[in-house]
């Protein structure tokens, strides 16, 4: 195994080991601070992070506004306060030499307001901004305002080239690195384009070489590329290290830091990770963002899969084979199905799936009365956590604050389920009934001898292990 040497990133020399910034309360100030103190780059999530009262107790993110716009403003305030709290914790643990990054999603609610508020309230504590889930053109502008480095997350050379030409070329000196997130291997939201087949993974090396060629054409020979997604043992990436064709490379670890003593996720989640088998992580498109995402195929995902399978197309009038009448809703408004689909509907109704919900695509899905009531309640309680949401039809764009489309019951409230899985610490069923993001290599917790007999390392022990190649 080649030696893992420090590289120049963000103006300093650091180990080329980056903690991935994972969602709501999954990578926080504690985990990122310890990662930074071990010599790598710690990354906390600034997506609706937890904040605390004077006694150090977590403040529940409860909403009291009467309208979605009112609740949206409450959410922004929570997000800013939480980001500041996590930045302070990370800085205190990471030490003066520790490098701390904040991760945001460009498609999260009020992304620019939130990260600006966090940077203003935590001046000097954050060294870099990592951002994906969309095309964050204004990321460089925000970084320049506060004098921090920025790290866009892309899944192709083409995406980076577009960002560079439109905005980043104006702030090239603060481009600390480019994160290549593999769309078939990474956990959470993935950057698959419409031209890429989710069922046909492409190897990362040719795609990263294409990214480096593009960067070299732009004069970015020495700007590190951070490989994210599928990284477990570095000895499996030995041909990437000190490879002159690739240039400086760092590796991002998103899934492995979940199973550390400092990881903030509940113990039931950590124990569940040790039981995963190959293929248990499912690439899907249920997210209200509209992006593909990778998550454990637990009860929550299975329910969404089954809900989407109980789906038929309808027409408002008799058209072609759509001639079988069917009444929708309390008033039984007539729509038309094909006779074949009507037979499916009768079987679903006989099994208790009696509520037909319309989708924006002129289809009906069938759920139980209790599930229908929960879907409606979640849509009504929307707090506008995304820039736009297909589940609730919220949009942060004025004047209507709506996507202009029908709310889509095939999706779910992502804010609710991510908050729940992080904070329902004492409920063993929490990991079954909530969204559980994960990279596709998570099954390796059960096969890697490092975790034998349920061993859970500290962050420092994990970093030391990674430096051996394993």
Image: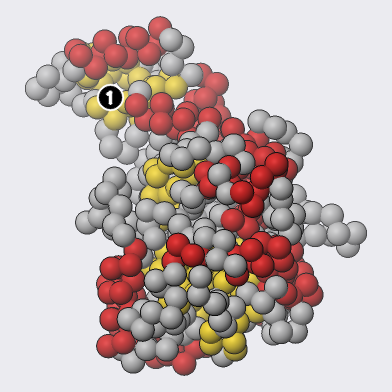
How many labels, in total? 1
Q: Residue at x 52, y 34 (%)?
A: 298
Locate the C terminus by quadrant. bottom right
- The reply to whether residue 35 is in sight is yes
Residue 410: x and y in percent read 40, 35
Q: Is residue 34 left or right of residue 153?
A: right
Q: Residue at x 58, y 42 (%)?
A: 446
Name, please, the residue furthest toward the front.
1
Residue 26: x and y in percent read 64, 55
Name, please, the residue furthest toward the left.
320
Q: Dividing the picture into quarters, in which one does residue 24 lie?
A: bottom right
Q: Is residue 428 left or right of residue 433?
A: right
Q: Dividing the picture into quarters, in which one does residue 340 lie?
A: top left
Crowding at label 1, few (<14), some or many (≥20) Cα neighbours within 10 Å? many
Residue labelled with disc 1:
312
- Given residues 133 and 355, the one toward you in this image is 133
Label 1 sits on a secondary structure element that is strand
Residue 100: x and y in percent read 65, 76
- Given residues 280 and 145, the one toward you in this image is 280
- Given residues 45 and 263, the one toward you in this image is 263
Residue 317: x and y in percent read 17, 24
Q: Residue at x 86, y 59 (%)?
A: 56
Q: Residue at x 41, y 54 (%)?
A: 185
Name, please, the residue furthest toward the right.
55
From what the image shows, is residue 356 above or below residue 199? above
- Given residues 411 and 102, the one toward you in this image is 102
Q: Dividing the picture into quarters, in which one does residue 29 lie?
A: bottom right
From what the image shows, is residue 248 above or below residue 34? below
- The reply to whether residue 61 is in sight is no
């Amino acid at each position: 195994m080649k030696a893992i040497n420090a590289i120049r990133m963000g103006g300093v020399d650091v180990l080329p080991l980056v903690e991935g910034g994972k969602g709501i309360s999954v990578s926080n100030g504690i985990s990122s601070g310890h990662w930074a103190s071990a010599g790598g780059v710690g990354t906390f999530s600034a997506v609706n992070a937890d904040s605390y009262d004077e006694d150090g107790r977590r403040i529940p993110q409860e909403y009291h506004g009467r309208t979605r716009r009112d609740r949206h403003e409450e959410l922004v305030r929570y997000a800013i306060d939480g980001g500041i709290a996590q930045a302070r914790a990370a800085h205190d643990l990471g030490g003066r030499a520790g490098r701390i990054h904040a991760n945001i999603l460009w498609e999260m609610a009020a992304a620019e307001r939130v990260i600006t508020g966090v940077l203003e309230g935590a001046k000097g504590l954050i060294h870099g901004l990592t951002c994906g889930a969309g095309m964050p053109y204004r990321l460089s502008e925000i970084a320049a305002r506060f004098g921090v480095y920025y790290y866009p997350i892309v899944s192709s050379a083409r995406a980076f080239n577009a960002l560079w030409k439109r905005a980043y070329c104006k702030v090239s000196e603060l481009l600390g690195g480019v994160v290549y997130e593999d769309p078939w291997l990474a956990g959470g939201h993935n950057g698959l384009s419409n031209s890429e087949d989710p069922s046909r993974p492409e190897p990362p090396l040719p795609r990263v070489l294409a990214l480096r060629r593009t960067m070299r054409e732009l004069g970015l020979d020495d700007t590190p590329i951070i490989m994210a997604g599928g990284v477990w043992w570095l000895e499996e990436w030995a041909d990437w290290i000190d490879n002159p064709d690739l240039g400086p490379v760092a590796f991002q670890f998103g899934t492995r830091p979940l199973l550390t003593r400092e990881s903030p996720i509940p113990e039931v989640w950590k124990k569940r990770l040790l039981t995963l088998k190959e293929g248990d992580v499912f690439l899907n498109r249920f997210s209200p963002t509209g992006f593909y995402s990778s998550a454990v195929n637990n009860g929550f995902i299975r329910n969404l899969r089954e809900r989407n399978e109980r789906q038929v197309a309808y027409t408002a009038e008799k058209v072609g084979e759509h001639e079988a009448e069917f009444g929708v809703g309390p008033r039984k408004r007539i729509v038309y199905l094909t006779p074949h689909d009507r037979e499916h509907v009768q079987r679903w109704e006989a099994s208790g799936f009696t509520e037909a919900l319309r989708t924006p695509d002129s289809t009906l899905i069938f759920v139980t009365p209790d599930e229908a009531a929960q879907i409606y309640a979640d849509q009504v309680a929307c707090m506008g956590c995304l820039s736009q949401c297909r589940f609730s039809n919220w949009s942060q764009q004025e004047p209507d604050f709506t996507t202009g489309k029908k709310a889509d019951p095939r999706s779910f409230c992502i804010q609710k389920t991510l908050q729940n899985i992080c904070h329902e610490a004492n409920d063993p069923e929490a990991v079954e009934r909530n969204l559980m993001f994960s990279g596709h290599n998570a099954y390796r917790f059960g096969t890697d001898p490092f975790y034998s007999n349920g061993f859970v390392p500290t962050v420092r022990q994990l970093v030391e292990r990674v430096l051996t190649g394993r």
